[in-house]
Image (cartoon, rainbow, N blue to C red):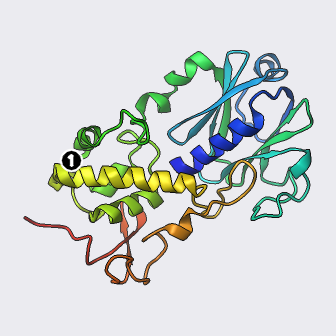
């Protein structure tokens, strides 16, 4: 599933590519991917102009000048790919993972008045694109429950410590994956941040002290910012708004590096299961302390 850096990368791309464009037509082939009435689509989406593209956690919000918004959750295999005259057909020659569009995974096709298009692709059909009044977006169940944004200026190590206390008896990795504790962190960046902070993923939250949480906070911010700089992590399905892959995975310290040497101590990275997810760590530097 795309995590915060991947969704943020898509947001930045869409802001550059589609803001100011006017919607001409909308086609969809799967009602669960596009659960909107035709009357709402005709009244609030067709002929509307895109005014902004926002993100909250792993959800994208495309604001329209009709005071409605398209709220998009990519889930496991969702992609939002823009195609203009300059990049239609076979896609980008430079590291593009997307060929001709639409294809068999295309669920929604938005055509703009300048003939450019925005495609919502989703192989597994778990993602969705909902059309809602903009004022109602904060009231979506997910939006009401999701935790703070880790890259916002007001997010601090103290806030992270306080948020984690609601999961005192959980492993730290399970707590980081809990979107009600902190927004946008998934498997890749949990592993990377915990390695950076030298914290074992199975360590109980209640056993971690404030200095450890402060170090974890620093690592979370550092890892997320680096991944955004590198365009996210292409792990199977993720691509950016132009169909290109992200390169962060090449800079990962532990994720998908089992049996390779730890960059700090050269001990072989191992893979275990924590919170139901494959988890990568250094067994020498990430140790559960019993004191």
Tag 1's secondary structure?
A: loop
How many labels were placed on the picture?
1
Q: Which residue is pictured at 58% across the width and 58% down the height?
A: 230
Left or right for 24, reference 141: right
Q: Which residue is pictured at 80% across the width and 16% down the height?
A: 43
Q: Considering the image in quadrants, where does the C terminus appear?
A: bottom left
Residue 124: x percent and y percent?
67, 54
Instruction: Tell me which corner region of the image, top left, top right, bottom left or bottom right, holds residue 243.
Output: bottom right
Q: Residue furthest left?
A: 291
25 w.r.t. 43: above or below? below
196 w.r.t. 142: above or below? below
Q: Which residue is pictured at 72% across the width and 35% down the height?
A: 34
Instruction: Tell me which corner region of the image, top left, top right, bottom left or bottom right, holds residue 13.
Output: top right
111 w.r.t. 101: above or below? above
The answer to whether residue 213 is seen in the rendering is yes
Residue 268: x percent and y percent?
37, 83
Residue labelled with disc 1: 168
Q: Considering the image in quadrants, where does the N terminus appear?
A: bottom right
Residue 263: x percent and y percent?
39, 77
Is residue 209 or residue 139 the one in the foreground?
A: 209
Q: Residues within 10 Å of mark 1 (few under 14, many from 20)?
A: some
80 w.r.t. 21: above or below? below
Residue 110: x percent and y percent?
82, 36
Q: Which residue is pictured at 60% across the width and 63% down the height?
A: 247
Left or right for 135, reference 50: left
The answer to whether residue 33 is seen in the rendering is no
């Amino acid at each position: 599933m795309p995590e915060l850096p991947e969704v943020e990368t898509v947001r930045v791309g869409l802001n550059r590519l589609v803001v100011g464009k006017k919607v001409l037509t909308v086609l969809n082939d799967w009602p669960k991917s596009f659960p909107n009435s035709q009357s709402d689509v005709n009244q609030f989406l067709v002929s509307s102009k895109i005014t902004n593209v926002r993100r909250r956690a792993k959800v994208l919000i495309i604001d329209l000048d009709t005071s409605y918004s398209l709220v998009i959750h990519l889930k496991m295999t969702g992609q939002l790919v823009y195609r203009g005259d300059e990049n239609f057909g076979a896609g980008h020659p430079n590291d593009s993972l997307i060929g001709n569009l639409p294809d068999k995974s295309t669920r929604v096709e938005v055509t703009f008045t300048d003939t450019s298009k925005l495609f919502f692709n989703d192989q597994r059909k778990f993602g969705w694109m909902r059309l809602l009044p903009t004022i109602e977006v904060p009231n979506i169940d997910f939006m009401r429950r999701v935790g703070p944004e880790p890259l916002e200026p007001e997010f601090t190590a103290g806030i992270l410590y306080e948020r984690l206390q609601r999961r005192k008896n959980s492993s730290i990795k399970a707590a980081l994956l809990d979107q009600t504790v902190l927004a946008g962190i998934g498997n890749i960046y949990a592993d990377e941040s915990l390695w950076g902070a030298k914290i074992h993923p199975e360590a109980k939250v209640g056993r971690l002290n404030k200095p450890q949480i402060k170090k974890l906070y620093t690592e979370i911010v550092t890892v997320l910012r680096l991944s955004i700089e590198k365009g996210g992590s292409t792990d199977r399905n993720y691509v950016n708004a132009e169909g290109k892959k992200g390169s962060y995975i090449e800079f990962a310290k532990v994720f998908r590096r089992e049996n390779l040497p730890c960059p700090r101590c050269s001990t072989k990275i191992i893979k275990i299961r924590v919170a139901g997810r494959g988890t990568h760590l250094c067994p020498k530097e990430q140790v559960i302390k019993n004191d």
